[in-house]
Protein backbone atom coordinates (compact mmCIF):
# COMPACT_ATOMS: atom_id res chain seq x y z
CA UNK A 1 0.00 0.00 0.00
CA UNK A 2 1.44 3.35 -1.03
CA UNK A 3 1.93 6.16 1.47
CA UNK A 4 -0.35 9.15 1.62
CA UNK A 5 0.87 12.19 -0.27
CA UNK A 6 0.01 15.00 2.17
CA UNK A 7 0.88 17.73 -0.32
CA UNK A 8 -1.71 16.38 -2.75
CA UNK A 9 -4.22 15.72 0.03
CA UNK A 10 -4.10 19.28 1.39
CA UNK A 11 -4.19 20.83 -2.07
CA UNK A 12 -7.68 19.46 -2.67
CA UNK A 13 -10.57 21.82 -1.95
CA UNK A 14 -12.63 18.95 -0.51
CA UNK A 15 -10.09 18.38 2.26
CA UNK A 16 -10.24 22.05 3.26
CA UNK A 17 -14.03 21.94 3.28
CA UNK A 18 -13.94 19.25 5.97
CA UNK A 19 -11.42 21.31 7.96
CA UNK A 20 -13.75 24.32 7.67
CA UNK A 21 -16.74 22.25 8.84
CA UNK A 22 -14.78 21.00 11.86
CA UNK A 23 -13.49 24.46 12.84
CA UNK A 24 -16.94 26.03 12.42
CA UNK A 25 -18.57 23.26 14.45
CA UNK A 26 -16.01 23.65 17.27
CA UNK A 27 -16.50 27.41 17.40
CA UNK A 28 -20.29 27.00 17.61
CA UNK A 29 -20.02 24.43 20.40
CA UNK A 30 -17.58 26.68 22.27
CA UNK A 31 -19.97 29.61 21.97
CA UNK A 32 -22.95 27.55 23.14
CA UNK A 33 -21.12 26.20 26.18
CA UNK A 34 -19.46 29.50 27.17
CA UNK A 35 -22.45 31.84 27.42
CA UNK A 36 -24.23 31.55 30.79
CA UNK A 37 -27.72 32.48 29.51
CA UNK A 38 -29.13 33.48 32.90
CA UNK A 39 -26.88 36.46 33.72
CA UNK A 40 -25.34 39.31 31.80
CA UNK A 41 -22.11 38.37 30.04
CA UNK A 42 -19.50 41.13 30.49
CA UNK A 43 -17.87 42.26 27.25
CA UNK A 44 -16.07 45.37 28.51
CA UNK A 45 -16.30 47.88 31.34
CA UNK A 46 -19.90 49.05 31.33
CA UNK A 47 -20.81 46.88 28.32
CA UNK A 48 -22.46 43.49 28.71
CA UNK A 49 -24.54 41.10 26.66
CA UNK A 50 -27.95 40.60 28.30
CA UNK A 51 -29.53 37.14 28.54
CA UNK A 52 -31.87 37.86 25.62
CA UNK A 53 -28.87 38.72 23.42
CA UNK A 54 -27.15 35.53 24.55
CA UNK A 55 -30.23 33.51 23.63
CA UNK A 56 -30.23 35.03 20.13
CA UNK A 57 -26.51 34.32 19.74
CA UNK A 58 -26.88 30.77 21.06
CA UNK A 59 -29.87 30.15 18.78
CA UNK A 60 -27.83 31.28 15.79
CA UNK A 61 -25.02 28.94 16.87
CA UNK A 62 -27.49 26.04 17.14
CA UNK A 63 -28.82 26.87 13.67
CA UNK A 64 -25.20 26.89 12.49
CA UNK A 65 -24.67 23.39 13.86
CA UNK A 66 -27.67 22.16 11.85
CA UNK A 67 -26.40 23.88 8.69
CA UNK A 68 -22.88 22.48 9.20
CA UNK A 69 -24.22 18.93 9.52
CA UNK A 70 -26.40 19.45 6.44
CA UNK A 71 -23.37 20.74 4.49
CA UNK A 72 -21.27 17.79 5.68
CA UNK A 73 -23.89 15.40 4.34
CA UNK A 74 -23.91 17.42 1.12
CA UNK A 75 -20.12 17.14 0.82
CA UNK A 76 -20.09 13.40 1.50
CA UNK A 77 -22.94 12.63 -0.90
CA UNK A 78 -21.98 15.36 -3.42
CA UNK A 79 -25.18 17.42 -3.19
CA UNK A 80 -24.77 20.89 -4.63
CA UNK A 81 -27.81 22.43 -2.93
CA UNK A 82 -26.53 21.64 0.57
CA UNK A 83 -23.12 23.11 -0.18
CA UNK A 84 -24.64 26.20 -1.81
CA UNK A 85 -26.78 26.80 1.26
CA UNK A 86 -23.70 26.54 3.50
CA UNK A 87 -21.82 28.92 1.20
CA UNK A 88 -24.53 31.59 1.52
CA UNK A 89 -24.83 30.91 5.25
CA UNK A 90 -21.08 31.54 5.62
CA UNK A 91 -21.51 34.82 3.76
CA UNK A 92 -24.35 35.84 6.07
CA UNK A 93 -22.24 34.88 9.11
CA UNK A 94 -19.33 36.97 7.81
CA UNK A 95 -21.70 39.92 7.35
CA UNK A 96 -22.96 39.54 10.94
CA UNK A 97 -19.39 39.37 12.26
CA UNK A 98 -18.48 42.46 10.24
CA UNK A 99 -21.47 44.34 11.71
CA UNK A 100 -20.49 43.07 15.16
CA UNK A 101 -17.01 44.54 14.77
CA UNK A 102 -18.47 47.98 14.07
CA UNK A 103 -20.96 47.67 16.91
CA UNK A 104 -18.23 46.68 19.37
CA UNK A 105 -15.99 49.54 18.25
CA UNK A 106 -18.88 52.02 18.47
CA UNK A 107 -19.80 50.84 21.98
CA UNK A 108 -16.22 50.81 23.21
CA UNK A 109 -15.87 47.06 23.50
CA UNK A 110 -12.71 45.42 24.75
CA UNK A 111 -9.89 44.79 22.33
CA UNK A 112 -10.12 41.03 22.92
CA UNK A 113 -13.69 40.71 21.63
CA UNK A 114 -13.10 43.14 18.76
CA UNK A 115 -10.02 41.12 17.77
CA UNK A 116 -12.00 37.87 17.99
CA UNK A 117 -14.73 39.23 15.71
CA UNK A 118 -12.17 40.57 13.25
CA UNK A 119 -10.42 37.18 13.24
CA UNK A 120 -13.74 35.41 12.65
CA UNK A 121 -14.54 37.69 9.73
CA UNK A 122 -11.07 37.32 8.24
CA UNK A 123 -11.24 33.53 8.53
CA UNK A 124 -14.79 33.12 7.21
CA UNK A 125 -14.33 35.01 3.95
CA UNK A 126 -11.42 32.87 2.63
CA UNK A 127 -13.24 29.75 3.86
CA UNK A 128 -15.94 30.48 1.31
CA UNK A 129 -13.54 29.79 -1.60
CA UNK A 130 -13.09 26.00 -1.14
CA UNK A 131 -16.79 25.61 -0.31
CA UNK A 132 -17.62 27.32 -3.60
CA UNK A 133 -15.13 25.11 -5.51
CA UNK A 134 -16.53 21.90 -4.06
CA UNK A 135 -20.08 23.08 -4.70
CA UNK A 136 -19.29 23.81 -8.35
CA UNK A 137 -17.56 20.45 -8.70
CA UNK A 138 -20.77 18.76 -7.49
CA UNK A 139 -22.66 19.92 -10.57
Image: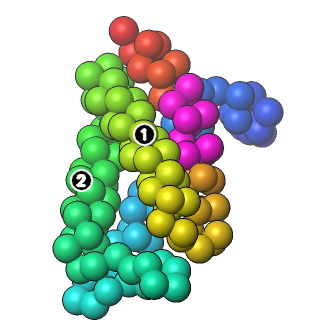
* Res 5 quadrant in image: top right
Determine whether, in the image, residue 104 is placed left or right of residue 55. Answer: right
Relative height, residue 12 to residue 28 (above, below): above
**Helix, strand, or loop for circle 1?**
helix
Q: Is residue 48 magenta?
A: no
Work out which residue is located at the far bottom of the displayed protein and give it.
39
Task: Give the residue pinned by disc 2.
Answer: 63
* Res 110 quadrant in image: bottom right
Task: Give the residue pinned by disc 1.
Answer: 95
**Helix, strand, or loop for circle 2?**
helix
What is the x, y in percent for residue 1? 72, 37
* Res 34 quadrant in image: bottom left
Relative height, residue 56 to residue 95 (above, below): below
Q: Which of the marked residues, 1 or 2, is nearer the chain's N terminus? A: 2
Q: Which stretch appears magenta? A: 121-130
- Camera sees residue 92: yes
Quadrant the C terminus occupies: top left
| Residue at (32% x, 86% y) in the render | 40
Amino acid sequence: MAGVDFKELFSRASTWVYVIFFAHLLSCILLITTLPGDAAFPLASGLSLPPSGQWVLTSFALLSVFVIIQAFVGAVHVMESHLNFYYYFLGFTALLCFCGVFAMIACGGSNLYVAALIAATVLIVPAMVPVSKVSKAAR
